[in-house]
Every structure is written in C-alpha cells, then in structure tokens.
Image (cartoon, helix red, strand yellow):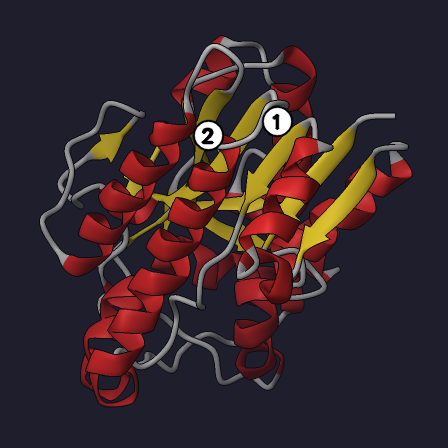
Amino acid sequence: MRTIAISGASGFVGSSLTKFFTDLDYKVLPIKREILNDKTKLEELLNKSDILINLAGANIINRWSESYKKLLYSSRINTTQKLVSAINNIDNPPKLLISTSAVGIYDNKATYDEKGSYSNDFLSSICQEWEKEALKAKSENTKVSIFRFGIVLGKDGGALQKMILPFKLGLGGVIGSGEQAFSYIHIEDLLNAYKFVIENSYEDTFNLTAPTPTTNKGLTQALGKTLKRPTILPVPEFVLNIIFSEGAKVLTDGQSAFPKKLLDLGFEFKYKTIQETIENLCK
C-alpha cells in the first residue's frame, strides 16, 4: 500500500483527494497544523510517505486587507518551506512532491500553456515564490511537480457552492463586463490528473484547467441554461471592490490557461467545456 501525505487536507480539494485515494487503497496521512509546526513529527510522517501533496493556503477569494495578504503569503510560502526543509533532512523522503500553484501566475493578455508570460501583481508574485520554494525539494530521491489550478468546480464545496444560490434565485449575472477569462476544472478531472501524474511518476509543471477556456459570461450562460433561470443582473466591479478590495481582481481579472502538458502526455479530460461541467454538477 502506497502512502500519501497531504497538507491542507481539510479543504475542498484536500478532502476530495483524501476520499479519492483512500477508495483506491492508498493510505492517506493528513498533515495537521500541530504536525507541521513540530519538526520531529513532520519528519517522522514524511519519512514513511511515498508521495507528498502540498495544498496548504488561505482562501484567495476574500477581502485583501494588509494582514490578510500576509496570511495569503505565509500560509503558502512558509508552509512549503517547512515541508521542503523536512524532505531535505530525512533519509527516506517522498518519491514525488506535487505542490500547488495557480493560473493567477500568468498575465491576462492571451491564452497560455505552461510557458505563458507572468504578471507582476501580488497574486502572481506569490505563485512564483511558492513554486520556487517547492522546487527546492528536487533531488535524486524526490521528483517535484507543480499543479497550477484554475477555479475548481465541484458539488460539495469550492467556488460553485458560493455562486450557485443567486443563480437558483434568478439573481445571477455576469461580473463586470463578463469578458474576463475564466479558467476552470471539474473536480473529477482534477482528481484523475493527480492519479495520472502519481501513477506515471511525471515531473513537470502542469496547468490544471479544462481544455476549453471560457469567460465569466460563458460561465453565467451555462449556469442560466442548466438551472433554467434568468441571468440579467450584472454585478458591477465597484461593488466587488468594496467587498473584496484588491482581492476583487481574482473575480474581475481572470487568466486564460490551456493544459498543454497533460494533453501531450495523453491525459483525457471527461469534462472539456463549461456547459458539460455545469450540467454534470448542477442537474
């Protein structure tokens, strides 16, 4: 039985991965905060793990006060530094580290594969540093892959759970112009991508996004069509700026990413379009 350690195991993606791999007869070890903050316990846990999945990080969709921006940074960078330090300090480190990043690393000037150009804003800077810290675990004994997430859509949590109620009430609509890119992935495809990379021991940076990027307008139309509700009430950008301050950029300034490396390796997405994704999750 192979063992997977997961930081951030209690979140939407982490709990989905825990169930998914447990059902596949993997042993899953959650890295709780008290273990993460205890060097000896962390090294003991990683010493008996074949794979480490690093998901830790405070929720990006929130009001970005200065203190919250520090939390966004520390929950990603400092956690990754602790994990990498433990990996580099033990005799039997995990064979593969899969660390998380986000398509927010890119600018919004085009649709990008994994070689796209980076933005110079706060979110991109965090992603760049997050990836740089994870790659310090790379050695003869440990491979490192980076998963750049789009918005993960699933029934039991995440972004869709937060946005679906207004649409069910007929109060849904585009955000701002609606033309901003919306890169997403169905939770089922995300889980299978982890399985695909783990079982084949791939080492690379991957965009975890559906192969057909859309826009906020495309998402809105798919939700309206599936739920049979009107989508005529737009959400003005200034309202989001009041609620989320700088964090509103996550909703108003999306990136368009394409999963070239997964597709080149032969990975098959089950949900290729936003309509397929929303119909599966909302019907």
Query: Mark 1 belongs to which amino acid?
Result: Pro
Q: Tell me where residue 91 sits by quadrant.
A: top right
**Number of dots carrying numbers:** 2
SS for callout 1? loop
Instruction: Tell me residue 187's x, y (percent).
Output: 64, 46
Q: Earlier in the sequence, mark 2 or mark 1?
A: 2
Q: Who's the residue at 39% across and 43% down the image?
A: 101
The residues bearing labels 2 and 1 have C-alpha atoms spaced at a distance of 10 Å
Instruction: Tell me residue 229's x, y (percent).
Output: 58, 75
**Which residue lies under the disc numbered 1?**
94
Please give left or right for residue 249 compared with residue 228 in the image.
Answer: left
Query: Mark 2 belongs to which amino acid?
Result: Asn
Instruction: Tell me residue 61's x, y (percent).
Output: 39, 71
**Which residue lies under the disc numbered 2?**
88
Please give left or right for residue 68 compared with residue 253 in the image.
Answer: right
Q: Quadrant location of the C terminus?
A: bottom right
- Choose between 75 and 249: the one closer to the eye: 75
In the rendered image, the vertical position of residue 249 relative to residue 203, given as above or below: below
